[in-house]
Amino acid sequence: MDSLKDLINVVNKKAIKRVEVMGNSTNYSSKMRELYDGIAEGRFETDNDAAHALYDSDEDNINYKKIKYRLEKRLINTAFFIDLNAPGYTDEDKANFSCYRNMLAAYILARLGIRKTGAKIATKTLNHAIRFEFSNIAYRMCTYLRNYHGHVTGDLKKMDYYHEQSVHYLQLAFNENIAEGYFSKLAALSYRSDVDRNSLEEIAISYLDEIRTIIKDQQSLILLRYYHFIHSIRYLLVNDYANLLIACNEAIQFFSTKSQLFKSGEAFYLWKLLSCIHLKDYQEGEEAIEATLSFVDKDSVNYFSALEYQTLLYFHARRLQKVYEIIASAANDKRLIREMPASIKEHWLLYEAYANLFVRMEKIDPERSPYKLKRFRLSKFLNEVPIFSMEKRRANIPVLIIQILFLLQQKKYSQVVDRMDALNAYCYRYLRKDETFRSNVFIKMLLQIPKANFHREAVTRKTKNLRDRLDNVPLEVARQSAEIEIIPYEDLWEYVLEMLSMRFHYV
């Protein structure tokens, strides 16, 4: 009761009349509510959109700037009142949020002179931090309690104990910070097109060696978490999917025994899916999909990634009807499409195009699906090549290929010839590295089609050596990125030959 009295006394003395948060209709104006709703509902994409709707002006309008600042302030306040009992929060999420909130409360109470209640909160917070291995919070709470017993209670034994514990957790937090920094460095370098992936793998190996040395003396879940991340990224960097699958299974086994860290295991399930696609292990891949979609938050980026990998898996497994159902279902979910990250949405439009191609080839029956794709405008697709983020030129490969396939399916041979010159130039300019070997070979196979005058048997003869080269470097051993081969080129070539006839067509 004493602690409760202290807290109520602080609230009354400081004259807190109201808590300025979103969610209490008495605390904000209609303009603020309109701004909040417009952003939440996706009606305001930019500041100018919002300023125009609210004040018939632009983003430099002083009234708009004021209302935007006030909304931001109240949203920050609201963050302290998030309902952690709502679905989607793991035990780790709840514990982490609670520990940080209580740690802040302990420091505030100490500054206000309510040291005994602050120490009580600090002790409770320390116990939670130790249980969930939040070393940084544990260190701060140990120093808090060391100083409390040193300056307030004079309990030398407790002061010495908390001092020793603070040194222990400070060292642990330091080591965890090193591991996290290595992980962040690899992530940053992996985005750079001017960095050699093999050299990155060597860096990852050196990081792993150092973390293993640290783990011999001091272990924590956070250290082991980053060890598994870097261990998997080592193979992901060089598209070594066989070893990536092994690393992911090891990580998943580790995380499955640590319920408070299970959410961190989502990435390994996604990398496992990627590996299964390349290794053609469709059964294990489907099991991984079911496991991932069963626990991943539907509002997270990982959910969209899982949906994308599920689509790729069924494309590769030749389960085209299933592909159509997934794509059509997603296309009919306005919320899903609205919240889909731009990078995945770019790929998604491409998957829709491939699905429509197979509908035209009668490989897919839309009537068997409870959902239908909207009418596909071929002319628009042929004239609009998606602009992929971060200059991922290789991601344009499947775009260029399917444009050719649509023209072949429509028997628009003169347009095929027109596009082949551009395709040849693209192949020469961008596809000269080992990781695009298969794409290079497949495009060269496509280039033979006009030379054989679109005759199926003639094309087959002209491409025999190229087809053999494709077989000699199958997908499961080719170290290339996943987005390049939406459908294995061996399978796609069979569909190409089906579109050709036994007649010569001269252009």
Image: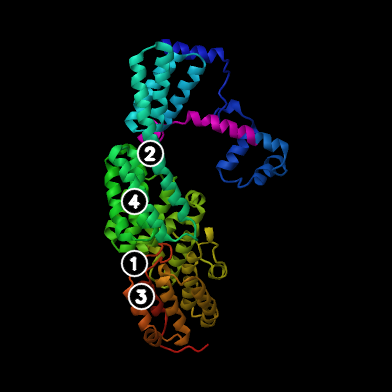
Report the number of numbered marks: 4
Q: What are the residue bounds of the magenta stretch? A: 68-95
- Residue type for callout 4: His
Q: Which residue is mark 1?
A: 318
Q: Which residue is mark 3?
A: 470
> What is the CA distance from the residue labelled 4 to the residue labelled 1?
32 Å
Q: Nearer the observer, disc 2 or disc 4?
A: 2
Colour convention: rainbow
Q: Which residue is mark 2?
A: 175
Q: Nearer the observer, disc 2 or disc 1?
A: 2
> What is the CA distance from the residue labelled 3 to the residue labelled 4?
30 Å
Tell me residue 341's x, y (percent).
Answer: 49, 52
**Frontmost residue, 470 versus 157:** 157
The residue drawn where x is 34% and y is 43% is: 225
Tell me residue 152's x, y (percent).
Answer: 43, 12
> What is the CA distance from the residue labelled 2 to the residue labelled 4?
17 Å
Tell me residue 161's x, y (percent).
Answer: 33, 21
The residue drawn where x is 46% and y is 76% is: 409
Tell me residue 46's x, y (percent).
Answer: 63, 47
Q: Quadrant of the N terminus?
A: top left
Earlier residue among tags 3 and 2: 2
